[in-house]
Amino acid sequence: MSDGGLDQLFSFRDDPVEEVVEAAPKQKSRAWWVVRNALLIAGATVVTIAAMRAGGLHISVLLVVAFFIGLRAVLYAVSEVAPPPLPKRRGGSQYKDDGRALDSLRAAVRRWERNLDRAHTDPDLYTSNVLPVIAELADERLRLRHGITRTSDPRRARELLGDPLWAALHDHGRRTAKSRELETYVDALERL
């Protein structure tokens, strides 16, 4: 990942997650929890028995109580294994679009746009972030479509990529590419 490949493109290192330390909720006494659940079960039992007797059905009170105790136990178990809340991110405005949270792909594309915008003025950023990803994409397309990479068959790879893209990938000079050149590179990758 040091060469800035696809892992860096799809990683979230540029967007740090803010560690949110929430105040611990007040600890309620265990006795209050038991009393509250007993009252809840008793109330549900009374309502259920009254409704059933009003309908002409007779059912054992112990069966209804056992049902509500079991239901409460299941609900408690489910609440204990609930997933932790998602971490909150800094700068909420860049993660919202018309009130909806952005998906990961859109966030990655926006991060790429920012990297490309900064790469126009910073040759080091262009050389360290943009070129390695373009090279990795080129190798992947060559491998998938033609069964070669730039290192396994350089002559054939150069023919397929074209001279402008080949020169850009092998010229590690400290110059940035213009938007038109990047479009040419992308077109060459799409033609593969």
Image (cartoon, rainbow, N blue to C red):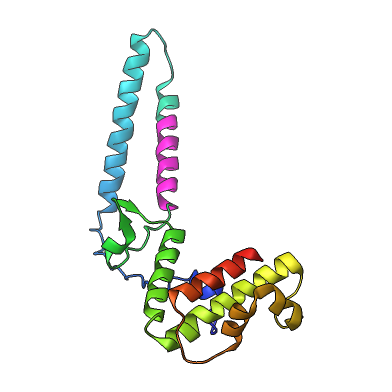
In reply to whether residue 78 is colored magenta, the answer given is: yes
Horizontal side, residue 8 vs residue 161: left or right: left
Residue at the farthest bottom position: 173
Q: What is the magenta range?
A: 66-81
- Please provide percent x and percent y for residue 102: 38, 56
Image quarter where the C terminus lies is: bottom right
- Please provide percent x and percent y for residue 163: 63, 80
User: For the point 61% across and 76% down, which residue is it?
Assistant: 136
User: For the point 31% across and 30% down, which residue is it?
Assistant: 42
Q: Where 49 sits versus 19, above or below?
A: above
Horizontal side, residue 146 vs residue 180: left or right: right
Residue 189 in view here: yes
In this view, the residue in front, 73 or 178, is: 178
Residue at the farthest top position: 56
User: For the point 59% across and 78% down, which residue is it?
Assistant: 165
Q: Where 88 sits versus 157, above or below?
A: above
Horizontal side, residue 130 vs residue 48: left or right: right
- Please provide percent x and percent y for residue 161: 65, 74
- Please provide percent x and percent y for residue 62: 42, 26
